[in-house]
Image (cartoon, grey):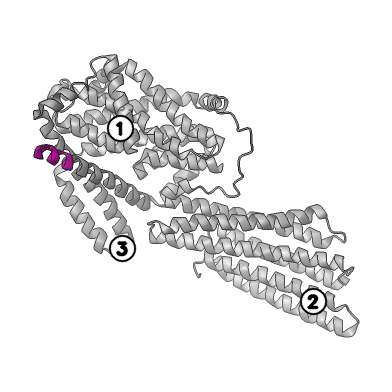
Amino acid sequence: MDSSLLWMFFNVIGGLGIFLLGIKYMSEGLQTIAGNRLRTLIGAMTRNRLMAMAVGTGVTCLVQSSSVTTVMVVGFVNAGFMTLGQAIGVIMGANIGTTITGWILVLTIGKYGLPLLGISALVFRFSRREGLRYLAMATMGVGMVFFGLELMKNGFRPIRQMEEFSKWFVAFSADNYFGVLKCAMVGCVLTMIVQSSSATLGITIGLAATGVIRFEAAAALVLGENIGTTITACLASIGTTTNAKRAAYAHVIFNLTGVAWITTLFGPYLVVVKHFLGDGFTNLEELNPRQVTAAIAAVHTGFNVTNTLVFLPFTRRLADFLTRLVPERAYREPPHLTKLDSRLLTTPVIGVEQSRIEILRMADMLRKMLFRVGAIISSKAADDQSVKKVFHTEEVMDIMQKEVTIFLTDLLSASVTHDVADEARRLLRMADEYESISDYTANIVKLHLRLHESNLELSPIDRQNILELHQEVQDYVEMVKTGYEENHPEIVSKAHTRGDGVTHRIRELRNQHLVQVAQRHSEPLMTVIYTDMLNAYRRVKDHAMNVAEVVAGEK
């Protein structure tokens, strides 16, 4: 291979690799800095389609990747956390948000990319402040993006003097409709291969800025890249629920239809773009590299904003069409006891937030479980249906705890911030504590059934004491759950006080029962079961206390 060709190849491939790595670092750094803002945005998804679109735009700007956003959307829909209509709105917004990459590249800091990368890398390596480290990571990503783009531009520059390449790139002409389609198809295929529209956008800008291809061809390539980026969501939908597949197909239909109609109006569309950019962009053949980048970014943004405005009023109709296009499967899809999905691991902050919601679901299930147990104990004849529901809930809690543990363990194995890791560890502990409470609650029912099977019955005094203790422990667990739900760390002091009271009450009941046994004849099995029930309630209280301490950050 000729040395000049080898040099060109090394620059282009090296620049592309640094560019892609820069996008990754910028995304991870911004996600971490955004933190709770991402949680707030995700919480707004439950509102109308305009809000969903705004959320999609905001999240994509923060994570710097429409692919990450659409994969998240597929994961949310797959878990049942988001409806199809909301998903379509978020996907539309993601297409707008991804255009910010082009405008970042318009900044005239290309030659400063390397020093920016070097300085921020030193800060990231040696700083002990976590917030500063992740700000440095995002800045380092920006530096890598610009340095990678400069390398690609330098690699592409000699192509203009190579006759064989010049002849080949003549094919990249968008002078007519079929030429536009051909360029769009190339952009689509290239994006499918590299799995990143940001990467192909960088390549397109590098080719156009060095004059290897004309601006019109670059604009057509960008349109095709919008179709190619949909492959990521399609791949993410493999093995998901029917609704998740519909969300992925919505992305394809939205971008494919948009490119189809805008390519038919390609000439007038470029005229509108030039008018928007101003008088300095009248002659596209005489633009400097920065102006070429701005023009390409304007084409990209204009297409996605216009396409979103056209489609937004028809969001519901698109959802109905997809429902007919992708019918429900003939067989029942496997149930998901939690709304956790591995696709959420790409955004740890959101993964932790969804895990927190699942822990609250476990707490709510436990509240209903305790209510049923109280009803079972208060009735003389055991209600088989209520007993089955209690044991079923205990089994479900076991599975949920396992799913939460697997998800959070996978999350912790990735590179996450100290805050996210600390919260994930607290959630792991809480899932374990709530699962343990469900075990002891089910044991109380088993002990109650054992009394019936042995034809034994608690004395009226013992029965009344157990019912009062049950209500006291149930209120205690509910108090801790409310403190966690409303994020009140001070709940731990109240929990300690009331917990000591519960423990003291259990001791009193045990002593009172033993005094009764000494005064009159009683079945030994009755005493064993009664004291075991008291011990089970004490263990329920202990594990609820552990939850309160986790909320307060003491464990």
Q: Is 285 above or below relative to 453?
A: above
Image marks 3 and 1: residues in contact by CB distance under 8 Å: no
Which residue does the numbered mark 3 point to in the structure image? Answer: 129
Which residue does the numbered mark 1 point to in the structure image? Answer: 190
Which mark is on residue 528?
2
Residue at (26%, 59%) from the top-left corner?
124
Q: Nearer the viewer, mark 1 or mark 2?
A: 1
Look at the image and give the residue range highlighted in magenta.
Answer: 1-11
> Considering only order in the chain, which callout, 1 or 3, is on the residue closer to the N terminus?
3
Q: Is 442 above or below relative to 20?
A: below
Residue at (36%, 36%) from the top-left corner?
97
The answer, for residue 269, to whether it is visible in the render is: no
* Marks 3/1: CA–CA distance: 40 Å
* Marks 1/2: CA–CA distance: 73 Å
The kind of secondary structure the magenta stretch mainly shows is helix
Membership of 241 in magenta stretch: no
Residue at (71%, 70%) from the top-left corner?
536
Q: Position of residue 320 (x, y in %)?
A: 56, 26
Query: Identity of the amino acid at label 1?
Result: Leu
Q: Position of residue 164 (x, y in %)?
A: 13, 26
The answer, for residue 15, to whether it is visible in the render is: yes
Q: Residue furthest front?
A: 1
Membership of 5 in magenta stretch: yes
Neighbours of disc 3 within 10 Å: few (<14), some (14-19), many (20+)? few
Image marks 1 and 2: residues in contact by CB distance under 8 Å: no
- SS at mark 2 in the image: helix
- SS at mark 1 in the image: helix
- SS at mark 3 in the image: loop
Indicate the quadrant where residue 333 lies.
top right
